[in-house]
Image (tube, rainbow, N blue to C red):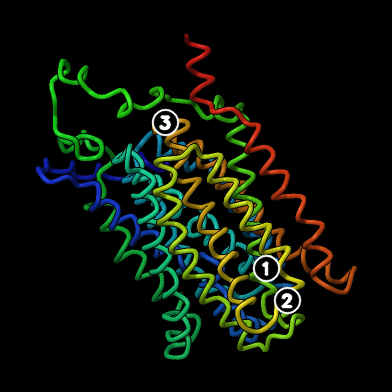
Amino acid sequence: MFPALLPNPRPPRPATRFSGWRIVVLAAVALGMTGPGQTVGVSVFVDPMMAALDLTRSQVSIAYLVGTLVGAAAMPRLGRVIDDHGARVAMTIVAGLFGAVLTAMAGVVGIVTLTLGFVGIRMLGQGGLTLVSTTAVAPWFSRRRGLAIGVTTALGSALLSLVPIAAAAAIGWVGWRSAWLLLAAAVWLVVLPIALRGLIDRPADVGQQVDGAPLVAPADRDDERAEDRPLVEVAFTRRQALRTPMFWAVASAVSATGMIGTGLAFHQIDLLGEQGLTAVQAAANFLPQTGAALLATLGIGAMVDRLAPRWVLLLAMALLASAMVAVPFLRPGWTAIGYGVMVGAAGGSVRAMEAASFPKLFGVRHLGSIRGVVTSISVAATAFGPVALSLGRDLTGSYVQVLLVLLVIPVAVSVLGVLAPDPRVVAVERTG
């Protein structure tokens, strides 16, 4: 429906230099602009909005939970838009609506309008713009796809980390309502030009080949080395992908890390405080987490190019489980830093693994629809992490016991990842 309302984007001009790495940079900038819809960006608005609207923290938390769950439901539909109309049209829609919702956030007057605003910014920021940005890179690469998506995610995460700093400064300067308006203007001024004038959906649109390979005659392609060719040219539909155990293994890994990682981050000050860290030391633990996540996205992205996705999945789950088991042994100093590294690396690893492995496993023809389902599930899962840890602590008096119970999740996901067959191998066996 929405694509029909847009003017036809100007067709991209033919290019002689490979445009894939330029797409990586543009997608990373767009990914960084998801910040106003991410928890780190919203968090700086919570206290001033609570005071102005006379709301309790519990009311705001419930509104955020509802907004996250409802917003997640739209991701499969957005994925279909990417597949049918391309990343340029999809990003134009998302950026336009995201800016409009951020503008509306400046006018919230109570719990109902706040909840509706959370629905919009979680749907379009955390979910929609993230999905479009990372999916836009996949058609441009094959052998170096993991590296390219890793670079996109790392650069985007680095830019995203600046959003709460800028938002906090804007709140102190012009107030929280005007700060929302400034963020809306930034999204429109940055992301809309990227979508309308910068993105190119496919290499063929500008006379190029995947990975920047030179154009060759069909007869020359027969001389390619066997190891340079993909296992099978796959083009799974969303329905076919959802029937494979590997889809659910990867989706479960992303959801497990999102749920538990969000819970650990949400309660980090209190959790690390139980282990003897001061509030300042606990807050500083986000630094090794951020650094490890950035390095992991680069390293894991490159690993996906060379290893079967199941082994990268196992590494991510091992990092997550190790961080959970380490909590009782944390003390100020190196053990706390090690914990931060494991938490950050687990999150960075699984995000890079999902974005890079799905094109490899299921092809790029229906990639938006397939990844849209994963995004929907994972975004919804993040809503339950803080609640699970909070309820567990209330029942047991400590975070340690609830983390030990939740340890069954990464263990189960690891088992599923080991047992799940490669869908490309299954496709060859069925067609052979």
Q: Position of residue 289 (x, y in %)?
A: 54, 70
Q: Position of residue 62 (x, y in %)?
A: 72, 66
Residue at image position (53%, 46%) is 312
Inter-mark Cα distance, 3 to 2: 41 Å
Q: Which mark is residue 279?
A: none
Q: Report the side of 79 relative to 240 (left or right).
A: left
Give the residue at the far left of this rendering: 16
Q: Position of residue 378 (x, y in %)?
A: 60, 50
Which label sits in the foreground, 3 or 2?
A: 2
Q: Which mark is residue 363?
A: 3
Residue at image position (49%, 37%) is 308
Three-letter amino acid code at disc 3? Gly
Q: Report the side of 412 relative to 75 (left or right).
A: right
Secondary structure, mark 1, is: helix
Q: Which residue lies under the disc numbered 1? A: 264
Please tell me which of labels 3 and 1 falls first in the chain. 1
Q: Which mark is residue 271?
A: 2
Q: Residues within 10 Å of mark 1 (few under 14, many from 20)?
A: many
Residue at image position (56%, 26%) is 239
Inter-mark Cα distance, 2 to 1: 8 Å
